[in-house]
Amino acid sequence: MGNITWVGMTRQHFQRGSAERIRAIVIHATAGRGPGDLGWLRKGGDERRPISCHYYIDKAGRISQLVKDEDIAWHAGVSRWMIDGQMRDNLNTVSVGIELENLNTGRDPYPEAQVAATVALTRMLVERYNVPRPQLVRHLDISPGRKTDPAGFPWQTFVARVYTNSEAGSASPQDQVRNLMLDLAYRAAGTGIAADWPLFAAARRQSLGLPVAVITTRPTGQSGGTGQDDRDRAVRLPGQAPLLIEAYARDLIYAEANGPDDEPPAQQQTKRLQQTPAGPLRDALLDLLFRSADPLHGFKPAWAFHQAYLKQPARLGVPIGANHRLTINGRQAFTCQHFSLDSLCSPADDWQTVYRLSEMNRTLAGLDADTTSTLRRTLLDDLYRARTGRRYDAEALLIRQAERRRLGAPLGRPEVVMVQTEAYLLMPFALDILACQLPSVDWPLDKALPSETKVIGLNNNAARVGGLTGILLGGHPDHPLTRLRQRVHLGLTWNQHEPEEPTALLGSPAAQPIIFDMGTSLHQHQQRTRPQTDTILITATTGPVGNDLYHEAAAGRWHYYIDATGAIYRLCDEACVATAAPDTALGERSIVIAVEGGPSDADTIQRRALSWLVRSLSTTLQIPSERIRVLRNAGYAKEYVHG
């Protein structure tokens, strides 16, 4: 390992401690560039959001130490993990924090020099403090849904290198690609890999696709979990034993947490929602499933969309988005909801008429050909902007591949990762993860690629999956299927078109954040004649988004809500009086914006969404900058939990 340079802190944003406290190591990404991010860390952030870490490693592999190992740095924030068999909160008190210079966008690479230095430093700390393998974690593991760092870091390979005492590690290039693809799929669902967990194994055995929502969080720190760990995390429904629950593209699966001899449930003990008989349990599971995608509404048996789901759940897949409104041609309003394998929409004034995205390659009853085509493009663009942050492009290579293989909806943003010296783009869809090798790590995703570009999939039966019926998200008759030749590359299955014109991988980045219009009549009981709006108030929420929208939005506290992914929910119009304002007089003149986690703790995507929304509102409503205020509760109360 190279030399460690002591740089220290310019402010004492840490606490004194002892070496005996160290039982875990947490890896972070700075979401910045050096040396500016190192300078920010050295001064401990600011007084509103004090932070610190023990080590910083730049892209050249240079290691700087800011806080002594034995002292408690403020890097982990609100966190939770299993430490030596006991569930612990506030991991600052038991861990060492390592920050890596990286933008944390999923596209910024981690050079081998940086990875090698991180391996060497971590291995030294593991040996010095006897840290077991399950207690080497990422920030995203211990703060799921709140943190995403270090995005794109080759985690499985890194852990293997640390604990095998081998610089090359035991993972082959194909295993590294596969591990990174699985990791991305689980992070898109808001958690981390749980490959040994019974629910994941059962979903894989039944070909249910990729994880969409983790209603029960994954095991925390123990491979496969323990009986007690499972019960601590289980969902408790009235009249039922504690349940472990996950939603995959084709169905929700669950199992009782109380296994024999205090062990996790066996795979054969798992059950599927679609096979559960009608009754209170099925009703509760349906509400959990729909609330995971639409926390404001949950499952409404009388709604036409949800009746359509009950009739054909296998064709629709599970819900992946909230019920919201779209407008086409500047005047026609529709209500829509996206599912993993199809999307539904209805005219705003005729909710009993339900159109399916998969049927919009032909003219639909009640719509002319131009309206059908426009609605189809609008739905697809809405879906891709919401899930990937990019526009829908029918010509893009990965989008065409997903549609031809019938992989369903995109589940998350694309990421570029480094595998040894090669750059790969990864993209999760409902039934598989697609990847392709890039000419360079900084290759623009909306630039034409060389014609020999290969697309690989995680599932070895990707071509066979494409033969299933009812899961195509809108066919493209103008793109007939070309002859596909199946080959094997890096041990994975991929299909290559021949011949094919060079094309971009994905559509262009969306110019503005996605806005889910939840309907302006949500809080009609609070609408009244009010003075002209002259103030924008920004407040923090503790999250996660499901709890916030389920409990707080229903109380009419906010006009807008921005979740950790940067998605904006429009909860009510300007005529509503949001109750989160500190007093009635101010509330009657204010637009209130809630930010999951708080504006001071927001990541880059969330900050951009907040900035765009504030600029848009202030311009439209002519609100001066001095009338844009952050409420006092928009930060954490305890300094030592920052991170």
Image (cartoon, helix red, strand yellow):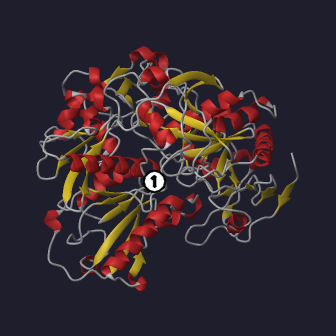
Q: Nearer the viewer, residue 460 or 602?
A: 460
Residue lying at 67% horizontally and 57% vertically, measured from the top left:
73
The relative height of residue 510 versus residue 419 in the rendered view (above or below) is: below
Q: Report which quarter residue 422 is drawn in.
A: top right
User: Which of 337 and 482 lies nearest the eye of the viewer?
Assistant: 482
The residue labelled by disc 1 is: 565
Where disc 1 sits, the SS reads loop
Residue 310 lies in quadrant: top left
Q: Is residue 105 left or right of residue 243?
A: right
Q: Position of residue 408 (x, y in %)?
A: 39, 34
The count of marks equals 1
- Give the image location of residue 370, x and y in percent: 23, 50
Q: Quadrant of the N terminus?
A: top right
Q: Is residue 557 left or right of residue 227?
A: left
Give coordinates of residue 435: x percent, y percent.
57, 36
Residue 126: image location, x then y, percent: 76, 39
**419 and 445: which is toward the camera:** 445
In the rendered structure, the answer to whether residue 605 lies left or right of residue 588 reads right
Quarter in which the C terminus is drawn: bottom right
Residue 312 sits in quarter: top left
Note whether residue 636 is visible: no
Residue at screen point 39% across, 16% down = 269
- The amino acid type found where label 1 is placed reads Thr
